[in-house]
Image: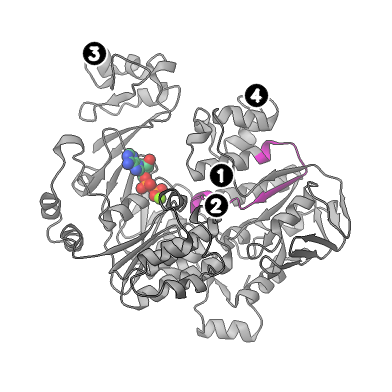
Amino acid sequence: MHRIAVIDKDLCKPKNCSLECIAFCPLNRDGGRCITLSDEEDRSKAIAVIDEDICNGCGICVKKCPFEAITIINLAEELEERKVHQYGQNAFRLYNIPVPKDNAVVGLLGRNGIGKSTVLNIIAGLLKPNLGRYGNGEPSWDEVIEHFRGTAVKEHLKAIAEKRIRVAMKPQQVYLIAKVFNGTARELLARYDENGSAEHYAKRLALHESLERYVNELSGGELQRLAVAVAASKDVDLYLFDEPSSYNDVYQRLEVARVINEIAGKGKSVMIVEHDLTMLDYLSDYMHILYGEPGAYGIVSDAMSTNTAINEFLQGYISTINVRFRDRAFRFESATSGEDLIMEEVVAEYTRIEKKRQGFRLVADCARVRKGEVVGIVGANALGKTTLMMMIAGVDKPDDGEFRINARISYKPQYLEQDYEYDVRTLLSEAYGKGIEGSSAEPLIVEPLRLKKMYDKIVKNLSGGELQKVAIASCLLRDADIYAMDEPSAFLDVEDRIMIARFIQRFVKGQGRSAVIVDHDMHMVDMVADTLIVFTGIPGKEGYATGTLSKRDGMNLFLKGLDITFRRDEESKRPRINKMHSRLDRMQKENGIYYSI
Ligand code: ADP
Ligand code: MG
């Protein structure tokens, strides 16, 4: 075994503790220097440093640290040889690296902070792997290539180092594009258009009406699709897409998936990171699972078939190497609907309503929300989903029709505010109305969402996924009858999406509350919703909302509009998109069964 010690730099605050890790380390007490401070002069700048060669893994520092900033893990010795990169002392490290395949889409599946973006950056040549020799002893490209001799990785890295391969990368954070490019969408496309296809992709990705706008005026979804179009219109050998679904609705996700598929169809290599399981499944020809401990280390599995990879990921067990990386397996019953647990009591209802905005009209059929019910809302962007949510929440009023709502609403918006200088504990306490620590809400909400160890983190430093979970917890901590959430899946990894979906179901049923949830991740909707409201219409012009339909009818209607059919995976029971025009797709369409339970 060899030991790795990882310090969370955001949590380690030597100026606010009594240096418990150093005081209690048995090796330090014997006069050794296992744990020291990075800056012995100035404690406000310092963090703890653990010497991994000396540390015996007793774990006392892990328990004593008041901020839970230390992680110590024992790993198999053999793994050390497969170390590809380490960001620094007591920092994240990556083991193994996948290789792109010609003519194929290779998918990467894993938790946030497990190293997926690190992998893409290395594959793209943006980050030179250091084999664990960070700092002054960094290896040269020649050494790195020599290290991987006899492997397919070597060929790829050699080609990257010698600049024989050209790479296009759609980065994870599309908002950064607006910070570095000062011009219109059309100008950005023109700058990188190498095969004359920018126009074509812009049209397909529904950007043609946004081309004259400045990049910094675009919405998240527009920026995402613009970034995809920019990458797709480069003429290169390898295309990398880091989370291309974020901010997009289902129609846009499908179109992005089709664009990516076409690129691979032209004989190119594609690698993609994605947390929307339905899309990742639909897109990938092969997949790698990344497992380990988020923020501490990540191991890349060998390539597997897509179906095996997803099912084994859900199982938490990789059979070929006999590794269990999660103690629980996720299983889905077909037709997970707790409809029999919904009570008759109506907490909110509305008649047929109409609402006009400049150039936009929403018509919604009458609907009701019952106690214990989770209503899912699905539909394209700009059809009025948020407008309806605002009226349910009582923030806005219809022009025609009537809302009868005898309920308190707690609302989580789609776009989250991050300008908050205080820590998570303070934010959650504000939502709860009193101190969260030690309260009865802690075991009920904070612990199941695994947020306790984030209490000391400053909200403005949180990652997208962490912020989303904090926002969901804040929403649920407010005392309300209806919890309305706009896109809770955004930025969460697959595991958290499943965890949150199940938690919302359990919370609503267990506490006799209700929820209304807008989301674009079909797997998430399938897990969380009892009933559905489906939006159709022309985005930005007119939206039409159905009343509350059964999940089966709602999904059927929605999928029909998308012209796709779902089947159930036999093993995991998760929904899968049928290949267009496949036997199953044709058969299900003939019988009008777009969604199978
Ligand atoms: P993923 O894409 O799977 O969410 P990342 O590759 O972005 O994961 O990050 C993996 C881990 O490496 C995280 O803990 C992250 O904080 C850390 N990390 C990423 N970039 C750096 C860096 N430049 N320096 C130090 N740590 C980093
Ligand atoms: Mg990433």
Residue 277 in the image: x percent, y percent? Answer: 49, 61
Q: Is residue 480 magenta?
A: yes
At x 25%, y 27%, the residue is 56
Cα separation, mark 2 vs mark 1, equals 7 Å
Q: In which quarter of the image is ligand 1?
A: top left
> CB under 8 Å between callouts 2 and 1?
yes
Residue 562 falls in image quadrant: bottom right
Dot 3 or dot 1, earlier in sequence:
3
Dot 3 or dot 2, earlier in sequence:
3
Pointer 3 residue: 30
> Label 4 neighbourhood size at 10 Å, few (<14), some (14-19), many (20+)?
some
The disc label shown at residue 468, or none: 1
At x 40%, y 45%, the residue is 113
Pointer 4 residue: 435
Whether 167 is drawn above or below 136: the answer is below
Asked which secondary structure carries label 1, the reply is helix
Q: What stretch is highlighted in magenta?
A: 475-496
Q: What residue type is labelled 2?
A: Ala
Dot 3 or dot 4, earlier in sequence:
3
Residue 341 in the image: x percent, y percent? Answer: 75, 54
At x 62%, y 59%, the residue is 525
Which of label 4 and label 1 is nearer to you? 1
Dot 4 or dot 2, earlier in sequence:
4
Which of label 3 and label 1 is nearer to you? 1
Asked which secondary structure carries label 4, the reply is loop
Q: Which amino acid does label 4 sit on?
A: Gly
In the image, 372 versus 294, the foreground residue is 294
